[in-house]
Amino acid sequence: MPDLLLPDSRFEQPELLYPGRKPVGNVVVNREHWAGRNCSFATMLRDPIPVDLVSGVSGVVNIATHKYDTIGPYFDFTGANDNYVKFDITEVSNSQVTIVFRSKFGSAQSFMGIGYSSGDRWAVYNNGWSHYLFHPSSGNFYNQAFEFPTQWVWNVITIDSVNNVSKWYENGVLLGTSTVSIPPLSSANKLSIGSGSYTAYPGNHDISDVFVFNSIFSSAEAFSIMNDPYQFLLPT
């Protein structure tokens, strides 16, 4: 008979049993975990001034509103342009990344950018009916018609500019694969969550967690992280 997994007060309720519990106390990235060893950025957006668990850098919040829902704390990026949480970071790869985030959407918006400046970044966005991955020098290198859900979902996006392959998974389902050429970034030392700055349009969406890994997840790894997204974090 398997051991009974008892509730741990360091994780939020009511989801008592592992996997899938979101940490509420202090956590660190487990570098011995298959995902944690390549984690280059991690924030659960739990605090009004969120922190990157990898670098310890605090985000700069502009307009975005910190709120609470049934899933816990999150940021609302509704309404204005330049409505974001921005981080200055140094660990993110400029050629191969996997981005994991939990989100809920309203109408047309852009919602995330990684790069050095507005002229050299990868942007993740939608226009209300399609998913896009974008670079200014080449335009969209991923375009998948799929209406964004208005309920909380987990997304996994892989961007591989070495092999020119990008993929988008949502709640365990592969939505599409693109083999359009992907320009590498000259630098990936900024990450902007929200609208404006590194992205293109006013926002209407909510985001609760963002993790970036300097590796390309396989389909099995993408499925694993979506079913247990906090598995690479350890409570302290």
Image (tube, helix red, strand yellow):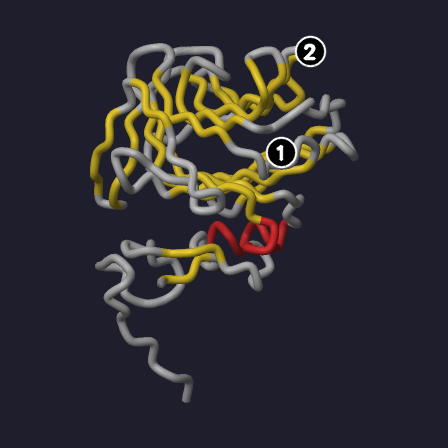
Residue labelled with disc 2: 137
Is residue 84 depicted above or below 221 in this figure? above
Task: Tell me what residue is drawn at x 44 percent, y 39 percent.
Answer: 210
Q: Quadrant of the N terminus?
A: bottom left
The image quarter containing residue 206 is top left
Q: Position of residue 29 (x, y in %)?
A: 48, 55
Task: Name the kind of residue labelled 1 in the image.
Answer: Gly
Q: Give the crowd class for mark 2: few <14, some 14-19, many >=20 residues within 10 Å.
A: few
User: Looking at this view, is 153 or 89 the one in front?
Assistant: 89
Q: Nearer the viewer, mark 1 or mark 2?
A: 2
Is residue 148 depicted above or below 2 in this figure? above
Q: Position of residue 198 (x, y in %)?
A: 50, 17
Camera sees residue 177? no
Q: Position of residue 50 (x, y in %)?
A: 33, 37
User: Looking at this view, is 89 or 171 the one in front?
Assistant: 89
Q: Give the crowd class for mark 1: few <14, some 14-19, many >=20 residues within 10 Å.
A: some
Is residue 118 depicted above or below 34 in this figure? above
Marks counted in the figure total 2
Of mark 1 and mark 2, the one earlier in the sequence is 2
Residue labelled with disc 1: 176
User: Looking at this view, is 142 or 76 the one in front?
Assistant: 76
- Is 82 placed left or right of 92 in the picture? left
The single residue placed furthest to the bottom in the displayed view is 1
Task: Name the kind of residue labelled 2 in the image.
Answer: Ser
Tag 2 secondary structure? loop
Q: Position of residue 231 (x, y in %)?
A: 46, 59
The answer for how far apart the CA atoms under marks 1 and 2 are is 22 Å
Give the label on residue 92, or none: none
Task: Tell me what residue is drawn at x 37 percent, y 21 percent.
Answer: 84
Task: Tell me what residue is drawn at x 66 percent, y 31 percent.
Answer: 94
User: Looking at this view, is 207 or 90 the one in front?
Assistant: 90
The single residue placed furthest to the right in the displayed view is 163
